[in-house]
Image (spheres, helix red, strand yellow):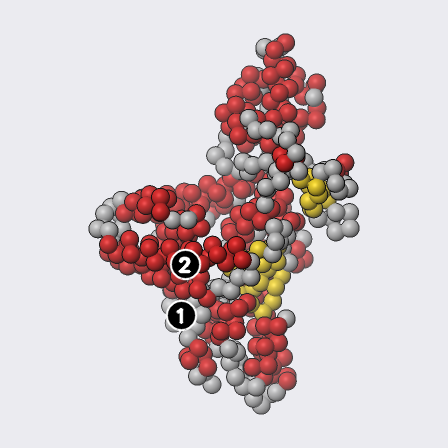
Amino acid sequence: MRAFATVLTALAAGQQPDIDYLKQAGYLYRTTAVYGNGKFGIADFDRLKGYQDFWQPFSAQMAAVYMLREFSVDQVEHIARQADPDRAVALHPDARRYLGIGNSTGLGMAPFLINHPQLISQWIWVRERALAVAVAQAPTEHDRDRMLALCHRAAAYLADSHVEDAPQRERNSEAHEELTQVIGWLEQVPLDEALWQQLLNWAQTHLSLETQELINTLLIELYPELVDALNDPMGADENLDLTPDMPLIQLKQILETRFDWAIDADYECEDARYWFWYQSAEKEEPRLGVRGQELGEEKELGLAIAPTAQRVYRDVVELLDTQPRALTIDLLMVSPEHMRVVRRIQTMAATVYGEIRANLWHRDMKPMHLLRAKLSFLGAHRFDPKGDRWVRVTFFQGAPLLSDFEDSAASPQVFDDWSFPVAPCAERVSASP
């Protein structure tokens, strides 16, 4: 509430808030995690997906978050007017646009990525397709100039971002410095129809992973008219179907080709079995416990797909030794506990992405990586980890205001080009009556 109180005091005194102060947070309100229906009083997705406005996953949640962002400024202006009707002023539109909505997300979101593999696979597939479409474009001089402008803006955004987490702050600083190299590369390399692929190849060799992913994002932003057409396939028909008559030898082949990362790993050493996931009885949210040291292991959630897939594989091999023509149903008759994972393995074999190729029991597993992956697809900015188990981010910072949609003179750039927002000019904002 510190930012809210500071902005309130300034507006009530007839002044605009200090822009440098707004950079520190970038929002007035902060919500809890946006990880499913029921939040903010939203109905279940099955009741919403028939409506044109909310047929995509999380569209209702993000609409609610956007409205909270709008209301946060309406509220602070209203209170300022009540505090001093004669002197109070409205927040300058540029400052208002710069404010987003804060968000705190913890372990409660992590299981979503495991429990919705088909949706996650679709999200990643669309993102990879968007990147492929962008990279395949033969750039013009205008495109290169636009990419340079995006790099400069992203660098300014990183310079403005206040992040408390030291490792993330170091990664941001490194990305900021490396963007200077990217700008130099773009200015020096001759224009070529394969320029973007050349850029990615060069970045893979010379730049950090953080900067490589930043370049990927900027390339997608470069061609909105092409990638926006990919919005429609962002949903998925989530049914993990069991094929009981699948020959067991075929299931074995699927495991060996699509789940080799899981069946070949070692899950017996202490570090590989360090964590277990369980659900808190008090808050009904996922928690992490240390195996053998903390209570709750008997209530472990089945989120670690990799070791379970390995157990299935071993039982498949054992049964095939005695029944070479066995079917999947034969395995499940002997080991019915495998049904959930077998259904998943059979279904996900037809997808390219969706499975987190890691051991979620391992001591080195960082839940933060799961949270960041999910939040990135919702458009989160200012990723600021608070330890390994929760994070603060900002949504809709720089996004158009409701008043922009009512303004026929508003520039298309307001609606289509607001990623990596840069703080508005302090002189322009403070000069506002």
Determine the residue positioned at 60% across, 13% down.
320
Give the number of the mark in front: 2 or 1.
Answer: 2
Tell me where residue 182 sits by quadrant. Answer: bottom left
Determine the residue positioned at 40% across, 61% down.
155
Hey, what amino acid is under mark 2? His
Disc 1 element: loop
- Of labels 2 and 1, earlier in sequence is 2
- Residue 215 in percent (x, y) is at 38, 51
- Residue 309 in percent (x, y) is at 61, 28
Determine the residue positioned at 55% across, 47% down.
369
- Residue 38 in percent (x, y) is at 67, 53
Q: In which quarter of the image is the N terminus?
A: bottom right
Residue 191 position (above or below residue 426): above
> Which residue lies under the disc numbered 1?
410
**Seen from this angle, which residue lies furthest left?**
190
> Which residue lies under the disc numbered 2?
176
